[in-house]
Image (cartoon, rainbow, N blue to C red):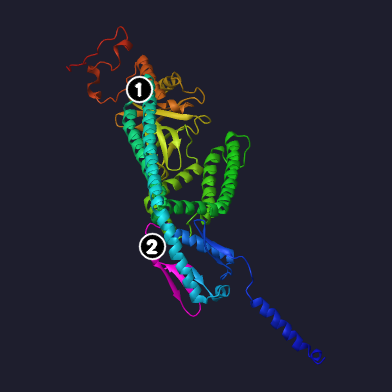
């Protein structure tokens, strides 16, 4: 038993037997290469990463594709062999490769086996092409004609549908115009819009027809094997952009959810601030040193700041925000806004200042420059004033901030607004009588308060007369013009009743020869023109 003394030798012999068995080709049924239900040959071994079955399926698919070509020619099948592998191709397209492992299942060597496969392909595929090419072409032509008829039918249906839709639209539009005419509304604009709508419908119909033709072309090209690449390319023009858009939307969903959360949080914070502002404006609760009329403007400022902050946070999540073009456009728009809105910015700043200065409120009677009227609108940019002649005048806030504003309403309800007017009376009239007459005229005027009592000031001692100014209190600042008019009427009546002339006595030298300057209804019944008094010296 000398061999038992060498266990390594025994192990080597066993491994040699195992390797020999492993290298011996396994006997199996093989995987057939089939074209048109006809088995051409079989593969007994795999190639690369492909198992025999996968390899046979791939080669069968390649062969089926080339025989479906209208220009297929079996003589174009070519065999190229080298020291490692043999390759069969058709017009530079790889069909199959034969390796040394395939030759182990045959009595031929690798080049001979590859040449045998080439002969089989040329003979069998040529017969298949001859038997099926004419029939396939006829069937393909019939299918193309069917596609053409289907396209024509769809175009006819589209035209008919649009004619029906136009009729319905025209009928509804005419009914609408008739109702507007019955209500007294102008219908000329509606008649101008109708041609635009009909033109838009024609354009839409044309686009639908073009879309149908474009979609029918790939279907027709898919029928013929030699035009399938064109069909694939045409479909790609539509499918690829749609696919890219859908994929972009799908990938953007996480950012979209983030934007939605940021927007909703900001929105509810704004709603909370709006609720607090409304409560302060309505007087439901107060904050020391914070006036109710500040509530809504402050809310508007905070809302703008919150939404601006929200946009800053959202900006990185916007699609394309990191691109240079997007950033360049953003900077360009910012520069345009800065240069084009300098006056608007100054008005906005002035509007903010005026809001917290509180020089006037909506409804106050004010005087801005030469403009006197009621404030009907006030915002960050402008203030709109309505005069007593119902003239709406828009004044920029920067103009108001740069000048003086007279508010007639602020103190009229508490202290009373003092209305005043002046007259000139000659020195020959006692001042206490003038004071009494002017006070009586003020008290007889509607809108003048009895308390505090009107008073008179003698503002000037002129060369020929004295200036008397009556001052009277009123709480009706919005009726200043009417009160002034009534006051002037009452002054005339009181002075005429007392026989006091309201005139500057410029004709003092001829006074005795002129009649008194008051209406005849107020003159005494026995009044006579005095005439000139002439005395003769002796």
* In this rendering, position of residue 417 left or right of residue 286: left
Q: Secondary structure at mark 1?
A: loop
Snapshot quadrant of residue 77: bottom left
Mark 1 vs mark 2, CA separation in Å: 135 Å
Q: Position of residue 53 (x, y in %)?
A: 58, 63
Q: Residue furthest right?
A: 1
Q: Is residue 196 above or below residue 528?
A: below
Residue, far bottom: 2
Q: Position of residue 524 (x, y in %)?
A: 32, 9
Task: List the residue tagged with mark 1.
Answer: 429
Magenta region includes residue 86: yes
Region rendered in magenta:
68-95
Q: Quadrant of the C terminus?
A: top left
Residue 55 x/y as whole percent: 55, 65
Front residue (pair 301, 23):
23
Dot 2: element: loop
Upstream in the sequence, badge 1 or badge 2? 2
Q: Write down the residue under mark 2.
A: 73
Task: Identify which residue is drawn at 29% across, 25% down.
Answer: 504
**Which mark's residue is nearer the viewer, 1 or 2?**
2
Quick one: label 1, few (<14), some, or many (20+) residues within 10 Å?
few
**Mark 2 closeness class: few <14, some 14–19, many ≥20 residues within 10 Å:** some
Residue 364 circle label: none
Q: Is residue 359 magenta?
A: no
Q: Residue 448: x and y, percent?
A: 46, 23
When asked about the image quadrant of residue 467, the answer is top left
Q: Nearer the viewer, residue 222 or 65?
A: 65
Mark yes or no: residue 333 visible.
no
């Amino acid at each position: 038993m000398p061999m038992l003394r060498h266990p390594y030798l025994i192990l080597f012999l066993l491994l040699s037997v195992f390797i020999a068995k492993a290298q011996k080709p396994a006997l199996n049924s093989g995987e057939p290469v089939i074209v048109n239900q006809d088995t051409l040959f079989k593969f007994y071994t795999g190639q690369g990463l492909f198992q025999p079955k996968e390899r046979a399926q791939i080669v069968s698919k390649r062969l089926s594709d080339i025989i479906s070509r209208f220009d297929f020619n079996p003589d174009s099948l070519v065999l190229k062999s080298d020291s490692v592998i043999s390759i069969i191709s058709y017009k530079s397209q790889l069909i199959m490769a034969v390796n040394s492992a395939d030759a182990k299942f045959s009595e031929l060597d690798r080049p001979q086996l590859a040449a045998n496969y080439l002969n089989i392909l040329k003979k069998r595929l040529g017969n298949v092409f001859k038997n099926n090419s004419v029939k396939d072409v006829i069937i393909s032509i019939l299918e193309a004609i069917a596609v053409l008829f289907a396209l024509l039918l769809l175009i006819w249906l589209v035209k008919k549908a649009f004619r029906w839709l136009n009729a319905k639209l025209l009928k509804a539009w005419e009914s609408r115009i008739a109702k507007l005419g019955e209500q007294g509304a102008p219908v000329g604009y509606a008649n101008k819009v109708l041609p635009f709508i009909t033109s838009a419908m024609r354009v839409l119909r044309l686009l639908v027809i073009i879309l149908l033709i474009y979609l029918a072309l790939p279907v027709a090209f898919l029928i013929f094997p030699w035009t399938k690449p064109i069909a694939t390319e045409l479909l790609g023009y539509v499918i690829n952009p749609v696919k890219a858009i859908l994929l972009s939307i799908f990938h953007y969903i996480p950012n979209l959810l983030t934007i939605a959360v940021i927007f909703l949080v900001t929105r509810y914070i704004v709603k909370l601030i709006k609720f607090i502002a409304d409560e302060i404006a309505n007087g439901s609760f107060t904050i020391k040193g914070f006036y109710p009329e500040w509530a809504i403007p402050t809310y508007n400022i905070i809302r703008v700041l919150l939404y601006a902050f929200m946009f800053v946070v959202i900006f990185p999540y916007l699609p394309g925000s990191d691109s240079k073009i997007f950033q360049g456009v953003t900077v360009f728009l910012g520069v345009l806004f800065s240069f084009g809105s300098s006056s608007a910015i100054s008005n906005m700043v002035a509007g903010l200042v005026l809001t917290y200065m509180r020089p006037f409120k909506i409804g106050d009677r004010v005087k801005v420059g030469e403009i006197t009227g009621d404030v009907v609108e006030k915002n960050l940019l402008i203030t709109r004033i309505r005069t007593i002649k119902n003239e709406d005048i828009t004044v920029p806030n920067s103009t108001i901030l740069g000048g003086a504003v007279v508010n007639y309403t602020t103190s009229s309800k508490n202290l009373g607004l003092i209305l005043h007017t002046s007259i000139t009376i000659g020195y020959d009239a006692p001042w206490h009588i003038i004071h009494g007459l002017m006070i009586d005229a003020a008290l007889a005027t509607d809108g003048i308060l009895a308390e505090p009592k009107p008073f008179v000031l003698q503002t000037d001692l002129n060369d020929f007369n004295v200036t008397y100014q009556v001052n009277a209190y009123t709480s009706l600042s919005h009726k200043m013009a009417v009160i002034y008019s009534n006051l002037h009427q009452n002054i005339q009546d009181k002075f005429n009743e007392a026989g006091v002339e309201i005139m500057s006595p410029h004709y003092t030298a001829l006074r005795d020869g002129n009649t008194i300057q008051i209406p005849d209804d107020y003159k005494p019944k026995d009044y006579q023109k005095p005439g000139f008094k002439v005395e003769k010296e002796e």
